[in-house]
Amino acid sequence: MATMTSLIGLINKIQRACTLLGDHGGEGMSLWEILPSVAVVGGQSSGKSSVLESVVGRDFLPRGSGIVTRRPLVLQLHKTESGTECAEFLHAPKKRFTDFVAVRKEIADETDRITGKTKQISNIPIHLSIYSPNVVNLTLIDLPGLTKVAVEGQSETIVEDIENMVRTYVEKPNCIILAISPANQDIATSDAIKLARDVDPSGERTFGVLTKLDLMDKGTNAVDVLEGRAYRLQHPWVGIVNRSQADINKNVDMILARRKEREYFETSPDYGHLASRMGSEYLAKLLSEHLELVIRQRIPSIIALINKTIDELNAELDRIGRPIATDGGAQLYMILELCRAFDRVFKEHLDGGRPGGDRIFGVFDNQLPAALKKLPFDRYLSLKNVQKVVTEADGYQPHLIAPEQGYRRLIDGAISYFKGPAEASVDAVHYVLKELVRKSIAETQELKRFPSLQTDIATAANESLEKFRDESRKTVLRLVEMESSYLTADFFRKLNAEPEKNLNPSDKKKNAEPDKNPNQSGHTGDRLNESYLRRIGSNVNAYIAMVCDTLRNTVPKAVVYCQVKEAKRSLLTNFYAQVGSREKERLSAMLDEDPQLMERRIQIAKRLELYISARDDIDAVCWK
Ligand SMILES: Nc1nc2c(ncn2[C@@H]2O[C@H](COP(=O)(O)OP(=O)(O)OP(=O)(O)O)[C@@H](O)[C@H]2O)c(=O)[nH]1
């Protein structure tokens, strides 16, 4: 079974590692939060520093009037078998202090480094480890003393600020509270007890410490408090006699002070019966034993938290991606895999499964028919324009039978109107595809960490789409031009057949005077009569309607063939060819990651290392 030394040593080690990672509490459940610690709480001048120092057995804490402790001091005591005592700060790990006067100065300087030489406070802790044969393994947190009023140079909120900071430490269920109250004040007015009662009403994690027993008025004693009658706590009260200011001035050393304290209790008529449970040494032992008990109880939940965190960190590493291979072949493989992932998402957009592909159907089903409908054939085939085109078509020559050239010109002119909607369909589908490329890049999880590759893929895909658009435009224009290049003769044959039904065909052939029938040639003297022009207009209109029906069906086919199918088939084909011939340096550049993400990965990896080593340490200690 684990020894007390190894258990507390283990917790010390994990706490130090937490601080290295900047994990000293804060938001969320952290390892730091679950590790047990002892916080020293009390009003100013209640004797906190004195208690801490006598537990440690050395003078090392800054002294002075006013607010001295302005940052939490996390003090880790490590018991060594032998050797000289030394101290080490986490912020200066290579420097070993053997002179405790220098330790005191370093605490003061390090406090100022964060807070400046003001009287402000900060909740960023200072970590100090003390290695000594004269200490027990213990982690103590010294906190600024609770005050009642702000003094000159302090902000109005200082009283509240200190209380809030102390509270953040002591309200955590893992915190053992060392509540320091001076015996020469009424226990009912103790700031430490007041706060401890607030955050630990059952008193199960509060240790009451009564200082300054030697300063009580003659004839009074604190037996009521020390025996738990004045204020009941789950743990026994411990009385302490620290060095007086006069002792400090006379440089009474700690060893002597402890001996004097022991003698005080042993010879005291009031406290003699309690002597074995009084004094700084007893307090240190009591705390250490309690801490061990708490750690033992906590180990299962610490292991559970560590395991849960390791799983979460691994999952996050998977999500943001593992580090990239350095080998060129592996990088090429990775780039192609990423392109394929993008391509899959893009195809899902087109084929369904993800939204967007339906907008292409919308172009053919709504936009194209609406644009065709809006073509200005009414104006183009107005009586006036028909007359103008037909008249101009044959130049100075009179029309003989039917205005053949006039018909052709009118039809040609009308068909050229279809170019607009056909090209607009090409463009509309182009923009839908471009948007789908953008969306697909954004939605490809695997690509998220590679902004450079995202840009490269977008550029390559858009270049391909431009090419497809050009091809598609040529094709639809060709479809329109084809309609002009050879007209459907059948349509006119049927048209000619209709009026002939009303006439006697033999008569028509015989007299060979078409001009006489206005329905046939429409000549009135030199000019075509109005109803004949109307008939030309309506014939051309009917022909155009037929062409329109055809194009409404063929333009979408051409667009899908040239743009959509090509996009599905070969959006990145050129890109693959280019990438395949690229140098390793360029491949690495394509896999450049977002610097923030890289930083995040390093952080997670560090954290993961801490948690894994913490788990190993716990395993090692528990199996000992
Ligand atoms: N006689 C005697 N004096 C004590 C005792 N405990 C503390 N003192 C004196 O009380 C004064 C304040 O003690 P500190 O230990 O500095 O008290 P603190 O709570 O750390 O004070 P701040 O850091 O200012 O909040 C010092 O002059 C100590 O010598 C004690 O048990 N007996």
Image: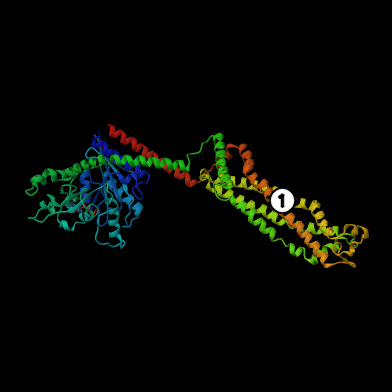
Place of residue 310 in the rendered image (x, y in percent of width and height, measured from the top left): 38, 40
Which corner quadrant holds the C terminus?
A: top left
| 403 or 288, nearer to the observer | 403
Q: Quadrant of residue 372?
A: bottom right
Q: Position of residue 334 (x, y in %)?
A: 54, 38
- For this rendering, which residue is in front, 361 or 56? 361
Q: Is residue 96 visible?
A: no
Tell me if residue 83 comes above or below residue 204 in the rendering. Answer: above
Q: Is residue 182 left or right of residue 109?
A: left
Between 102 and 311, the one nearer to me in the picture: 311
The x and y percentages for residue 467 are 67, 47
Total numbered badges shown on the rendered structure? 1
Locate residue 294 relative to residue 518 in the image: left or right: left
Q: Which residue is found at the position 28% from the left and 39% from the top?
A: 299
* Vertical arrangement, residue 486 with respect to residue 384, above or below: above
Which sits in the foreground, 163 or 355?
355
Is label 1 within 8 A of ligand 1 (CB to nearest ligand atom)? no
Q: Quadrant of the N terminus?
A: top left
Q: Secondary structure at mark 1?
A: helix
The residue sitting at the top extreme is: 624
Label 1 sits on residue? 476
Tell me the amino acid under the disc marked 1: Val
Is residue 526 in sight in this rendering?
Answer: yes
